[in-house]
Amino acid sequence: MPATYEIISRETGRVLFVQPLVLDPVRLTGCSMTSGSSVLTVSSTTALHPGMGVECSGIPRGAFIASILDATKVKLALSLLDSVSKKWTTTEEAAEAVSSVENRTAIFTGHPLRPVAGEFSVGVYRDEFDSTRTNPSYGYTLPSGPSFQSGLSVLNGYTDDGASLSLSAAKSRLDDPTMHVAPRHLTESWSEWLFVCTGGHIAHVLADPEMHSVRLKEITA
């Protein structure tokens, strides 16, 4: 019995998008998962598809099927905000069970509870200084103490010995070709709602969790 979902504006309550033909939830008993693993063992994967959400005690909330491994095993993934980089990433490690899951009932849905996050490139830049904080072209080294953002030229001051002034910090780069540091990608984060439809087709809908919400509209008999 396929379902229809609506994406709603949190601000106006207006329906922004309607997604029909989403797979009905699949309930499987006897599911198990080893602590520290993202592989879930089920009785059968016949009715399961990549992209389906997983709801089961002991499995991180918002996990979804990343791939079908064989007739009884699926690999899970989850999107989380990295506390260090402050970036959203989707990894299998994030979906690992914190404790062993044994003989549990799992519900697999056509719509995961959380959006799936990722990043895309919007260009490249070059670091001004290498890992030793020394400009490889000019030999200037950033001063110790506070840390500086990669790619910035920082003027820390001058040393006056009574006869001349000498630069004690950094010098701006002249042009990229003189730098011996590989370019890095500038990225922007994005997220999307997944809807697994009839036949296992995945509908990708751009998501803004702060502005949009998803609700079940109806289930077709």
Image (cartoon, grey):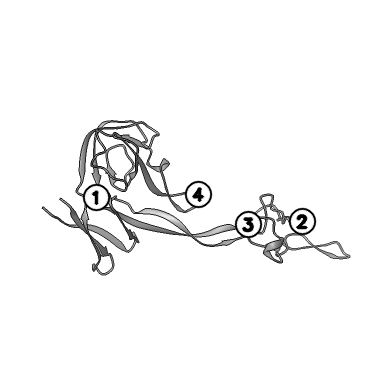
Q: Nearer the viewer, mark 2 or mark 4?
A: 2
Quote the CA–CA distance across marks 1 and 2: 61 Å
What residue would you read off at disc 3? 148
Q: Nearer the viewer, mark 3 or mark 1?
A: 1
Quote the CA–CA distance across marks 2 and 4: 30 Å
The correct choice, above or below, for 33 with respect to 218 in the image is above
Q: Secondary structure at mark 2?
A: loop
**Cβ–Cβ below 8 Å for labels 1 and 2?**
no
25 sits to left or right of 194:
left
For image coordinates 34% across by 54% down, the residue present is 115
What residue would you read off at disc 2? 139
What residue would you read off at disc 4? 84
Disc 3 residue type (three-letter): Phe
x, y percent for residue 88: 43, 53
133 sits to left or right of 83:
right
Disc 2 residue type (three-letter): Gly
Quote the CA–CA distance across marks 1 and 4: 39 Å
Quote the CA–CA distance across marks 3 and 4: 16 Å
**Cβ–Cβ below 8 Å for labels 3 and 2?**
no
x, y percent for residue 128: 66, 59
Which residue is at the far left?
221
Of 179 and 21, nearer the camera is 21
Q: Secondary structure at mark 1?
A: helix
The correct choice, above or below, for 77 with respect to 203 in the image is above
What residue would you read off at disc 1? 199
Q: Nearer the viewer, mark 1 or mark 2?
A: 1
For image coordinates 45% across by 56% down, the residue present is 119
For image coordinates 20% across by 55% down, the residue present is 21
Q: Determine crowd level at label 4: few under 14, some 14-19, many 20+ residues with C-alpha closer than 10 A.
A: few
